[in-house]
Amino acid sequence: MKQISMIKIAAKTAICAVVAGLLGGALPAHAQEKPLVFMTWGGVWQKTFTELAKEYEAKTKQPVTVIAQGAGEAGVARLIAQKANPEIDIWSTNMVNYERAKKEGVIAAIDKAAIPNIAMINKSLVFSHGVTGWVSLRGIFYRKDLVPFEPKKWEDLWDPRLKGKMAAPAASFDPGYFPTMAALLSGGNEKNLAPGFAKLKQLRPSVVTFYTNNVQSIRLLEAGEVGLIAWGILPNVISYIKPGSNYGFVVPEKPLLVAETPITLVANNPRQKQAEKFLDFLLSESSQNVMAEAFGAMPANNKAKGPEVVQTILKNLDNSYPMDYGHMAANMSEIISQYDREVIQ
Amino acid sequence: MTQRIRAFLLVSPAMLLLVVFFAALTTVLSMSVRNTAGDFTFANYIRFASDAHFLGYLWRSIRVACYVTLVALIAGYPIAYVMSRGSRRFASIITLALAIQFFSIYVIKMYGWMLMLGNNGVINRFLKFIGLTDAPVRLMYNELGVAIGLFASALPLMVFPISSVLQNVSSRYEEAANGLGATPLQAFFRITLPLSAPGVVGGAVLSYVFCFTAYLTPSLLGGSIFKMIGNLIYDQAMVGFNYGLAGTAAVVTLLMSLLVVFGINSLGGRLLPGGTR
């Protein structure tokens, strides 16, 4: 008898739960009270955007939740999985994943009229489905005590004095950029990478190891395993670059390769209007100053100033190479296979 | 009827897990037989099978998994034997050491090995200090580093199953064999080893599958220079977004793993007759 009543109770509880769930789903959504969800990278990015979100909520009463995506590829995979019913409203990513997301139809076209601060952004940093939030510089990161000379240009990587002293990016790290740099030095480009792979093969004897993430590259330098990181991301190492520091970072200008970081609005989203307002806030001069300072990057807003250390490394982006990210995104599988095959293995 | 409902309720969580598991597997299989347009094709499998570069990943993974498992067995069996036959205190110390090794966060473990094996790591500094070498010995960013990292992680997977079986094998069997004129070695090979076969087989399967599907260890200790099949799957799926090729590599990995598990079980039964039943 006891068993029968327990089963009855369990069944009744389950029925109640189902009914409550159905009722909850049927209630009209209060979009204004529900937080906007902004997906970005973890660490300093999540921390900075969380602070900006608090400022935005204090001004507008619109709460914003900032979540971490891990790698950029994980972010786009998540958006694709949620395409029919997105849980994310705004997303920051890199250009390759931006192109991928655009192709998959998971990010919305930008309505410039709804985002007034776009007028303050350099036209080359505004795209059909996203606006650059900040520009991340790429260059050579090194320890002054472990290299025979301080590199100034990309060609210095091939100096025989650096044999056995450097680490280079693995195929999956900032994919496509490093072979593009080598290709541009050899008469090729991102659509013709063969000269780049041939040039990187010549670099192979100098490379001790290939790193797959920022932490690994920094650790290699800190531990003295290598004296130079051939492809460094300035925002990740900005805290090491101080006057009198043993670490140096150079952004070679021929070619000048930078990474625009677009902020996008997720497609099929009932809260697009609210998301546009938050994006406009992120593009304001004050937000841009905060972001550039925290990320060690160049701001996208013309009126904002980047941190001093970045300004000493690079004055402006006038000569940056216009990468065809769409081509890279479409051919990434082959690019990484070829890189592994011809350069690393 | 009540009993049926009860049985169903008890089994349903496990069944749900199995359904989800097989749904995921089916999705991977489906991806492997489709091109970017979504059309059915075996092109991914043909490409994988005909490209020496991709087969190289598979061969490296099989090779490393085989010898690391063998070394783990040779090193792990005596440890398991001492744990089951030695003093309780000594057994507890070994168990604790292996448990710490097993349960510590994997990434931290691998970074620890990087500190040990690096060109500027503890071992090379020591070798330089005692005057054995002038230049660093290459212990990492190659197959050796990957094998060392995998061995360290696979050892508990080998030791624990063997130890748990040996604990149920009474030492009186060995005493009886000795009493009947067998040497200790004869008693071991004729009595103890066959009876410990289920543990050996279990440990070998766990170690092999762990090593064969490794991703993080070759990524960190291999320096992307020595990559295994897990690295190929990740790169193609997460960076290249080539789900077809990644799915193909995943299906091949699964089939190879099942084949080896079946092979190890069969081999265990043949080499150690009467021990696996």
Image: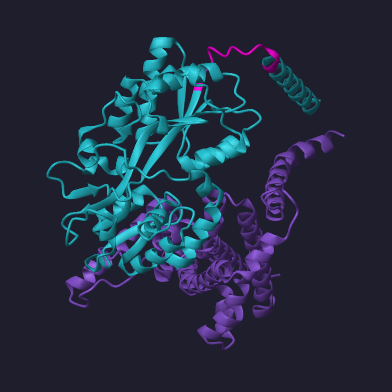
Q: Which residue is drawn at 50% across and 65% down?
A: B159
In the image, which lettered chain appears cyan?
A: A
Residue A18, quarter of the rendered image: top right
Q: In which quarter of the image is the C terminus of chain B?
A: bottom right
Q: Nearer the viewer, residue B196 or A313?
A: A313
A51 horizontally vs A105: left or right: left
Task: Say if B163 sits above or below B273 in the image.
Answer: above
A282 horizontally vs A286: left or right: right
Residue A55, quarter of the rendered image: top left
Task: Say if B258 sits above or below A97 in the image.
Answer: below
Residue B42, quarter of the rendered image: bottom right
Q: Residue furthest bottom?
A: B181
Q: Where is residue B162 in the image (x, y as percent from the top left)?
A: 55, 66
Residue B208 appears anywhere in the view: yes
Q: Where is residue A39 in the image (x, y as percent from the top left)?
A: 48, 31
The answer to if A29 sits in the magenta stretch is yes
Q: Residue at x 31, y 38 (%)?
A: A317
Q: Which residue lies furthest to the left in this view?
A: A244
Q: What stretch is highlighted in magenta?
A: A25-36
In the image, which lettered chain appears purple?
A: B
Q: Which of A246 and B109 is in front in this view?
A: A246
